[in-house]
């Protein structure tokens, strides 16, 4: 019996979560596993009513769950940063979800903006460190509001945090068993403190994995090769900020935000899975948002829980729907409503 905490969140989050749960139900019936869900109303509306995001007692309750399924966080009436810091980052940091896992996989070549690229050319995974770096929120102002003002933002990297992320990437690469290559994406020529630590740790950990090839690319070069030669990549490991940036580019070359799912992973604890496209408030309530990213997030969640057959069935169903039914992956252009796209996946399963 899996206990799933559901956070529908803001904007179109509840709509895509609804479809994800519909697919979860279909998969459970076919592959004979049991689950129960509990919905938490964390998000913008709750914040506007209570001025609260997530409290420590909420985090402690979530620790008792098998996994968390998140829709989206972001409300137009709430100042940017409040919900992201108070909900998303608090969950990631408090639950020690130190890996952000982003598969970048093209299901239908027709939806790829890159010329002549096929599904086999766009199939890699980004392993992003998810609990340190610039997103730690460390820094200060000096002489704020004056012409001499200085804003200091600290990239905080520990040997322990860096090593566990890199080791996860190598283990994932070995399990993935594709090209057997891990690429370190950084900026060693300019960010000499943080990336000296990353490079040294990467070289040390790599010795424990002689069966896996290694590579290095500056982050700016990585974005270039994503566009020109995405087939070069297998598993990429990087820090929090660079990972945040390159995974959005990855989403575009796999067809768009409508298909992009991610996991915030604690290998020894509670992990959280979500579509990465955000709350898309302009589409709220119109039944036109693409739910496939949320459905893929459910597949990732089940794979993480050990329900491998169910996870594979969901991915195969998404591939079939994407290649045989949809006109586009963009909201409002799919040729079907949000609800019908979910039904198509269920029917395929």
Image (cartoon, helix red, strand yellow):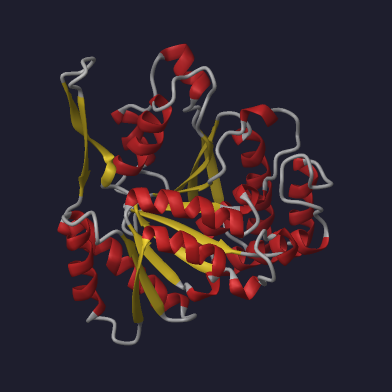
Percent position of residue 6, x then y: 52, 39
* Residue 112 lies in quadrant: bottom right
The C terminus lies in quadrant: bottom right
For the view shown, which residue lies furthest in the top direction?
49
In the displayed structure image, the side of residue 121 where residue 137 appears, left or right? left
162 relative to 263 in the view: left or right: left
Q: Position of residue 82 (x, y in %)?
A: 39, 25
Image position of 185 with respect to 171: above or below: above
Residue 345's place in the image compared with 124, above or below, is above
Could you say which is closer to the camera, residue 122 or residue 298? 122
Q: Foreground: 197 or 322?
A: 197
Q: Would residue 242 appear left or right of 26 to someone viewing this image?
A: left
Q: Residue at x 50, y 27 (%)?
A: 41
- Residue 45: tell me if it is visible: yes
Question: Residue at position x 75%, y 30% from top?
Answer: 286
| Number of numbered discs on residues | 0
Q: Position of residue 207 (x, y in %)?
A: 22, 81
Q: Is residue 63 above or below residue 259?
A: above
Residue 148, above or below 306: above
| Residue 109, quarter of the rendered image | bottom right
Question: Residue at (25%, 62%) from the top-left corner?
Answer: 164
Q: Residue furthest bottom?
A: 211
| Residue nearest the viewer, comparing 282 with 310 | 282
Residue 1 can be seen in this image? no
Residue 193: x and y, percent?
16, 55
């Amino acid at each position: 019996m899996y206990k799933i905490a559901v956070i529908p969140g803001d904007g179109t989050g509840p709509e895509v979560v609804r479809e994800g749960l519909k697919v979860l139900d279909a998969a459970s019936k076919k592959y004979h596993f049991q689950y129960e869900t509990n919905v938490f109303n964390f998000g913008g509306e709750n914040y506007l009513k209570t001025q609260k995001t997530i409290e420590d007692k909420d985090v402690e309750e979530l620790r008792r769950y098998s996994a968390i399924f998140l829709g989206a966080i972001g409300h137009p009436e709430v100042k940017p940063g409040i919900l992201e810091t108070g909900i998303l980052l608090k969950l990631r940091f408090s639950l020690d979800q130190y890996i952000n896992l982003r598969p970048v996989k093209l299901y239908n070549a027709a939806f790829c903006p890159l010329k002549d690229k096929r599904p086999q050319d766009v199939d890699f995974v980004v392993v992003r460190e998810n609990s340190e770096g610039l997103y730690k929120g460390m820094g200060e102002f000096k002489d704020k509001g004056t012409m001499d003002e200085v804003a200091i933002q600290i990239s905080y990297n520990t040997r322990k945090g860096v090593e566990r992320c890199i080791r996860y990437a190598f283990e994932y690469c070995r399990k993935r068993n594709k090209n057997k290559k891990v690429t370190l994406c950084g900026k060693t020529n300019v960010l000499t403190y943080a990336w000296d630590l990353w490079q040294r740790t990467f070289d040390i950990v790599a010795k424990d994995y002689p069966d896996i090839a290694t590579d290095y690319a500056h982050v700016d070069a990585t974005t270039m090769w994503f566009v020109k030669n995405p087939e070069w990549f297998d598993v990429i490991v990087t820090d929090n900020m660079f990972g945040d940036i390159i995974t959005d580019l990855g989403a575009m070359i796999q067809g768009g935000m409508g298909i992009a799912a991610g996991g915030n992973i604690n290998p020894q604890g509670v992990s959280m899975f979500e579509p990465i496209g955000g709350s898309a408030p302009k589409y709220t309530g119109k039944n036109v948002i693409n739910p496939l990213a949320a459905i893929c997030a459910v597949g990732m969640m089940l794979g993480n829980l050990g329900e491998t057959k169910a996870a594979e069935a969901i991915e195969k169903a998404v591939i079939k729907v994407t290649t045989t039914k949809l006109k586009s992956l963009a909201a409002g252009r799919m040729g079907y409503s949000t609800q019908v796209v979910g039904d198509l996946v269920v029917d395929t399963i």
